[in-house]
Image (tube, grey):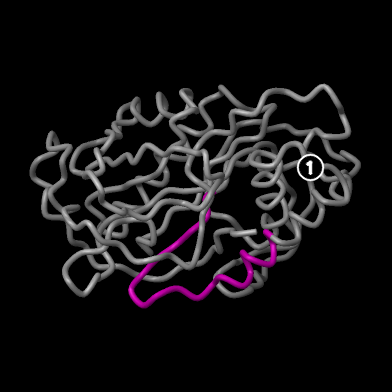
Amino acid sequence: MGSVPLGLSASPPLFNNANNPNNNSLSLFNNKKSSSSSSSPVPSRLSSSPPLSNPSKSGVCKASQLAELFPSTCPEVVVREARLEDLWEVAETHCSSFFPDYSFPLDFVLRIDRLVSMLAGLSLPSGCRRTCLVASAGNKFIFGSEEFKFGEFEGKIGFGREHIVGILTVDTVADFLPRRGPLMQRRTGIAYISNVAVREGNRRKGIAKKLIVKAEAEARRWNCRAIALHCDINNPAAVQLYKGQGFKSIKVPERAKWPQPKSSPNTQFNFMMKLLTSPSPQ
């Protein structure tokens, strides 16, 4: 199963059309060749799977059902970078959103696969960055003053009722952007969003919007001048969300073989982009 690793690194900016926010053609992308990608993030979208009538296929891994010992006193959703202790819930959120029909034990295997991919993918091409953002609700009691670190993930020992309710990955690896020049060089200065997912019980509460706003802030901090994504055209809720945040559909040139996320053969994608020269819509 193809999946996106998480990690961090650094990227220089370059975007030729930054001074023309109304230019949807984005002449930056005028190459008709692209190189194949070794990683395959799930396309950026909100899961549109209908509610399931069978509780055994609710997308919640039985191995992760714990007793709720502590009441939540702060249910506000906070968007932040993922920490080491979040990784299992990140894997759960990903799999329950994109593969909701899988039940135990296969759902558990999928989560292990996702977890291993995240831990194994800390290395990135030189000059690139990647981070996983999470939307957390509730609170957690933290023990100790010393932080521990594994790769690029930091953490502390804690317990409580903080839950991951949404996830998003943003990077500058540019695997799914058309390469430039005869040498098929990797594009720089453009952030790419993928793996946007919100748990079923927390949808339509503005969580995905908060994640996107945070991703744009990260892209600006990395000196990116644009941010892009692929969206399933059969997911109108996601398309409307991105358009509301200022993303515009980019027409792919005829017969151009731009890279796309690897998914179902019948999935059609809408390539969308936003220039980061103006504030995000509120």
Residue 57 placement, left or right of 93: right
Question: Which quadrant of the structure image shows residue 270?
Answer: top left
Residue 275 placement, left or right of 235: left
Q: In the rendering, at what x and y percent does residue 79 appear?
A: 52, 43
Q: In the rendering, at what x and y percent does residue 64 appear?
A: 84, 48
Please tell me whether residue 105 is drawn above or below residue 49 in the rendered image: below
The one nearer the camera, 41 or 207, is 41
Query: Which range of residues does the magenta coloring cover?
Result: 114-133
Q: In the rendering, at what x and y percent does residue 82 appear?
A: 58, 55
**Image point (75%, 33%), residue name:** 72
Question: What residue did someone put label 1 on?
Answer: 102
Please tell me whether residue 213 is drawn above or below residue 172 in the rendered image: above
Residue 134 placement, left or right of 97: left
Please tell me whether residue 28 is drawn above or below residue 234 in the rendered image: below
Dot 1 surroundings within 10 Å: few (below 14), some, or many (20 or more)? some
Question: Which quadrant of the structure image shows residue 271?
Answer: top left
Which quadrant would the N terminus be assigned to in this image? bottom right
Residue 261 placement, left or right of 153: left
Kindly state the secondary structure of the residue where label 1 is placed: loop
Q: Amino acid at mark 1?
A: Tyr
**Image point (75%, 50%), residue name:** 141
Question: Which quadrant of the structure image shows residue 122?
Answer: bottom right
- Which residue appears farthest toward the left when viewing the image? 19
Which quadrant would the C terminus be assigned to in this image? top left
Marker count (numbered): 1
The one nearer the camera, 84 or 123, is 123
The one nearer the camera, 7 or 156, is 7
Q: Is residue 126 magenta?
A: yes
**Image point (50%, 34%), residue name:** 208
Q: Is residue 258 magenta?
A: no
Q: In the rendering, at what x and y percent does residue 35 appear?
A: 34, 66
